Amino acid sequence: MMTLTSVKRACAAAVLAVAVGGLTVAPAGAATVQSGSGTIDDPWVPTRAAHITCSTATLFGNYTAGQGHSDPIDTLVQGNYIGVRYITSDHYSADVFWHGASKWGFLLRSCFSLD
C-alpha cells in the first residue's frame, strides 16, 4: 500500500528525471569567448576560466565602448579566479563573473588571462 509520502517521493523523482533528461551539458573545452556589445540582447554563452593578472583590477557595473567603464563594484587582486562570459567587440573590456563574491561586472581586458 502506498502512503502519501511515498506518492510524493515518486512524483518528485519523476519530475526530476524529466527535468534532468531535458538538460544538455557542453564539454568544458567547448566554452568560447565571444565578442559582445555589452547589451542584454547578447546571447548567453558559458563562462571560461580565467584569473586576474594585474596587482589590482576594478570590477565595474557598466561598460560602453568609447566612454569606458563606470559604476565601480569591487576590487579584485592578482590571482583571483573569474569566469569570462564574453570580451567586448572593441577588445577593451570583458563581461566576467567573480566567483569570490558571486558578482557579475565588466573588467579591463588587459587585467586577466584565460586559463
Image (cartoon, helix red, strand yellow):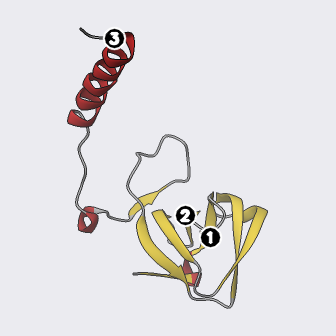
Query: Residue 19: x percent and y percent?
Result: 29, 30
Task: Give the secondary structure at mark 1.
Answer: strand
Q: Which residue is mark 3?
A: 3
Specify whether 98 is left or right of 25: right
The answer to whether the residues at label 2 and label 3 have Cβ atoms under 8 Å apart is no
Task: Note whether residue 76 is visible.
Answer: yes
Q: In the picture shown, does residue 20 fall above or below 38?
A: above
Of the two numbered discs 3 and 1 on the same chain, state the one appearing first in sequence. Answer: 3
Q: For mark 1, what is the residue?
A: 107
**Quarter of image, res 17:** top left
- Labelled disc at residue 96: 2
Is 67 placed above or below 114 here?
A: above
Query: If you read the primary sequence from the N terminus, does the residue marked by circle 2 or circle 1 appear first?
Result: 2
Residue 18's place in the image compared with 74, above or below, is: above
Q: Amino acid at mark 2?
A: Val
| Amino acid at pointer 1 | Leu
